[in-house]
Amino acid sequence: MSTTEEKMKPKVVVAPYGNPARSLAGRAISRRQALGLAGSALAGVAALASMPKTTLAQSSAAVVESRADVPSPLTYNGQGTFGRLFPRLPAFASDSPEVRANLLELGKREGIMDAEDPPPPANPLTPNPNNPDNPNLTAGITFLGQFLDHDITFDPTSSLQSQVDPATIPNFRTPAFDLDSVYGSGRRASPHLYDRTSPDGIKHLIDAGWPKDVPRTSQNIAIIGDPRNDENLIVSKLHLAFLKFHNAVVDEVMSGGATNPTWVFDEAQRLVRWHYQWIILNEFLPKTVGQELVDSVLTNGRRFYKPRGVPFIPVEFSVAAYRFGHSQVRPGYIANFSGDNGQPFLKHIFDKTANHNGPDPDDLSGGSRAPRRFVDWQTFFNVGPTPPGHENLGASPKPNKRIDTKLSSPLFELPFGPPNDPQTLAQRNLLRHLTFGLPSGQQVAKAMKIEPLTPDDLSDLQPLGFDGQTPLWFYILKEAELQADGLMLGAVGGRIVAEVFIGLLQSDPASYLRQNPNWKPDLGQNQTFEMADLLRFAGVV
Ligand code: HEM
């Protein structure tokens, strides 16, 4: 190792986590397949049954890679499952045909959760009083939120039809903000994600023929660490931005004189993760739950998310609180300014009439490749004004949708998933509450010593009998609407998201919070770093 490398060496060397998902992720489960698995208990069991018993332990060992001599501090040993924040609270309702019917009614298309946006060919940017803008957040925050979710939680096996104990459901992602969705199992175990033309494969694979798209197989399956990051065009190109960010950081590290590929990779990965974690703690989380709550959890500690030993993902978070982001999705977006034959590529996020088996569906779904399917980030983040000639599209970036109990209409007709399963996202989220026996929002509020919403606040649920014991996801959306005017989460939702996010960062021995809490980012300007800086550094704007 050169003197420069010695100097740059991190003080504490920590191996990354093991990941139970990795061997399965390598089998390229698509979002459609994932939903298929989720929709069928039998299929889920089959998927698990086909997983060799030793896989989990082996995958832990595999990711240690170049640091094989350092034992992973948080290996799974088969224990990477979901859990509960409030194990003593009863379910919000017992699983009966009537309750199921009422949940389906609540989450149905043209039901009370549907914002009733005009369908294509209407312009999806047409203002809809049911779907108000959030002036505090830009449209890209939604997809950053989705990308973050795909880094920490993946349940492709639990069923919508029957109840399970979360502790028996494997989480196919590591519960850490470590970008396993991007790095897969590392260069040795996921070589298909890496560029063999870089020294010892230390860069991510980018398709030279399609540099504005994620790499794909000849059948258009994205060659990425988590198939869900190709669910829609925007999250897919965000994934691409992270691949390019890593590659740019590799160049940066090498420009300092380092030559040992293993060292360069590890150092670049650490910098990528720490800058990403900085964005989570200093940009995403304050915008989502408020700076005051972030400061309070950091200063006074967590009150409810206190994993003993290994961190886990609580179902109150994965099934309810963190699905708040479904309410931030707009009916459609300007993906780019002039990619559609010189015109803006402005479409609904999903259009059920589009040909999803073809190479270029007429919506913003993922899973396909065509010249117009790229993103100009100006309409999503603060990276610059609307380019000249496109002033008719209004100012950039576009605002996010407020968090409320309405979802944009395209989410009521998802273009993927098994045909016999509910195709509305709201119904899927609500049925998942029965799967895991989630407590009601009111019960959780009381357990947190927070004044619960009243039945009057939830009077629209009265005909369904959920106004007194409300499914947690709906409760958290209503709370955001009433307590924060939809600009961010309310008391219960904000507390769950803040504690789990901060808890995951604090439980990760490799995070900057653990290794060097006073660390400041050095790839941006003035010791700070936002998504806009990441996109610039990655060279995608
Ligand atoms: C266009 C955007 C999005 C689409 C189409 C989408 C779709 C889906 C679907 C189909 C599921 C599985 C539902 C089930 O069967 O239970 C899901 C799960 C989930 N989504 Fe989204 N989502 C989007 C954006 C977001 C955002 C912005 C967030 C958060 C900020 C989010 C958070 C979650 C979470 C936490 C889960 C559960 C993950 C798991 O444990 O497996 N999603 N989403």
Image: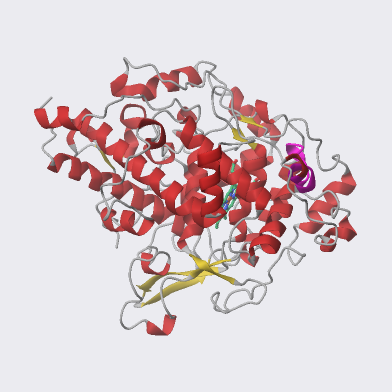
x%, y% of residue 491? 66, 51
Asked whether residue 432 is in view, the answer is: yes
Q: Which residues are magenta?
A: 434-445
x%, y% of residue 507? 49, 30
How many discs appear? Answer: 0
Q: Residue at x 39, y 56 (%)?
A: 237
Q: Residue at x 19, y 31 (%)?
A: 261
- 410 or 14: which is nearer to us? 14
Q: Residue at x 21, y 34 (%)?
A: 264
x%, y% of residue 160? 72, 41
Asked whether residue 153 is in view, the answer is: no
Q: Is residue 374 magenta?
A: no
Along the horizontal axis of the image, is 488 left or right of 240?
right
- 73 or 25: which is nearer to us? 73
Along the horizontal axis of the image, is 84 left or right of 47?
right
Q: Is residue 435 magenta?
A: yes
Quadrant in the picture for the C terminus:
bottom left
